[in-house]
Image (spheres, helix red, strand yellow):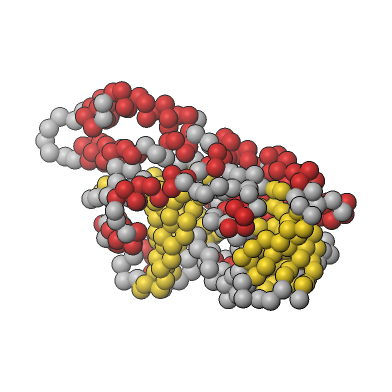
Amino acid sequence: MVQYFDVIVVGAGPAGSVTALKLARRGLNVCLLERGGRPGAKNMFGGLLHNTPALNDLVPSFWEKAPLERHVYKKVLAFMTPESAVSLTFENEKFDQPPYNGYTVLRPVFDSWLADEAVKAGATLLCDCTADDLVAEDGKIAGVTVKGRDGELRANIVIVADGVLSLLAKQAGLRADFLPSNMGVGVKLLLGLPEATINERFHLVRDQAADIAFLGIPGGIRGGSFLYTNRESISVGMVMHLDSLKESGKAPYDILEDLLQHPQVRRLIKGAESLEYSAHLVPEGGIRAVPKVYTDGMMVVGDAAGLCYTNGINLEGINLAMTSGALAAETAIAAVESRDYSDSMLSLYKRKLDESFVMKDMKKFKSAVGMMHIDRLYDTYPRILSNIMKKVYKVDGTPRKKLLGLARREALKEIGLKDFVADGIKIGRALL
């Protein structure tokens, strides 16, 4: 049996659901496939959602309707050594007023809501469906086969949003195998705490949230850690470079346990109840690892297209994913109207991406990939900063030193001048 649609969207994460929602709103016959028992069942991310215009355009004032946990009011960047942490805290009253800058969310709840919005608009949602192969006809992608399901699903266009290890993008010849150097692994533990305890411990009121980023993973592994406050839980975890993790010979959950035992973190999660552990691969190759994102009858969005980057402070992914989904939907609408599903027509999607903030930001911070491979960034520099602050604040009866001289002395004691200058150039290129 063969079922026909205008467009098939594979993957009901944020990218796929935004795509399906926009298409259904225009009256297209859309099928949204999800391999889990429900949207969000197989998905994981740290827990931070920014105020993405692509979502707000589809669901105006979405923060009043979506199942969000809290809005981010407090941003903290902490440089950690095994026994200390030097923190920079940013609070802004404008972050405490709608439209908020960002929110903490739980993917199983948020993804289900967003997919349901697409269904309300007319999309067909099929769960427990894994698209395991592409159907080709006359040299173009014309549909998919679904594991354990008889027959085929056919469409004029297939939009692939099946995640970082997209098998369909590989089958279409749009990408090669990933390199470990271009990948990270994210691990997260969800910890239950009463709302009143979270507010008191993190100095929050109402539905304010704290977003804490830690630089300095235990064991010197390249990557960063995070802690987000939800309504009655805390999301704590880390994103580690895959090649660095492999070299360490350690299991991700062992490293996460070391993080939980750090004095700075242990104090914040005291008394919390473990609710859920999850892990997920993250594309970290930057713009150089983005594959071709279209071919005859097919487009690729979100993590499947490698649309994720870091500028050393922020890790951007979900907002890029939803924006790419909206742009793919716009391209599909134009293709259906013109009845042209060729590679040439769908190249409009790439042009839209290039003109958006998605590719502009990925190009702007392309050097950050090299910066994030500086091993000293994760142990040596946090240790230098900690030593400087310890000597600034310590009172022991000895004469104090001026800050600039103290910083120079501590830095050169840990790092040779040549390496210090080389690191400075890499960091400058990435951030300035």
Snapshot quadrant of residue 198: bottom left
Q: Nearer the viewer, residue 37 or 401?
A: 37
Is residue 114 shown left or right of residue 400?
right
Percent x, y of residue 235: 43, 63
Q: Nearer the viewer, residue 296 or 60?
A: 296
Is residue 81 shown left or right of residue 429?
left
Q: How many marks?
A: 0
Residue lying at 63% horizontally and 48% vertically, measured from the top left: 174
Is residue 27 shown left or right of residue 320?
right
Q: Is residue 363 visible in the rendered structure shown here?
A: yes
Percent x, y of residue 292: 64, 44
Residue lying farthest to the right in this orientation: 338
Percent x, y of residue 350: 70, 43
Residue lying at 73% horizontally and 58% vertically, measured from the top left: 136
In the rendered image, the vertical position of residue 366 relative to residue 260, given as above or below: above
Residue lying farthest to the left in this orientation: 397
Q: Nearer the viewer, residue 53 or 279?
A: 279
Residue lying farthest to the front in this orientation: 138
In the rendered image, the vertical position of residue 413 relative to residue 62, given as above or below: above
Q: Is residue 63 visible in the rendered structure shown here?
A: no
Residue lying at 73% horizontally and 46% vertically, measured from the top left: 349
Is residue 372 shown left or right of residue 349?
left
Q: Nearer the viewer, residue 344 or 429?
A: 344
Quarter of the image containing the N terminus? Answer: bottom right
Residue lying at 43% horizontally and 66% vertically, measured from the top left: 278
Percent x, y of residue 258: 28, 58
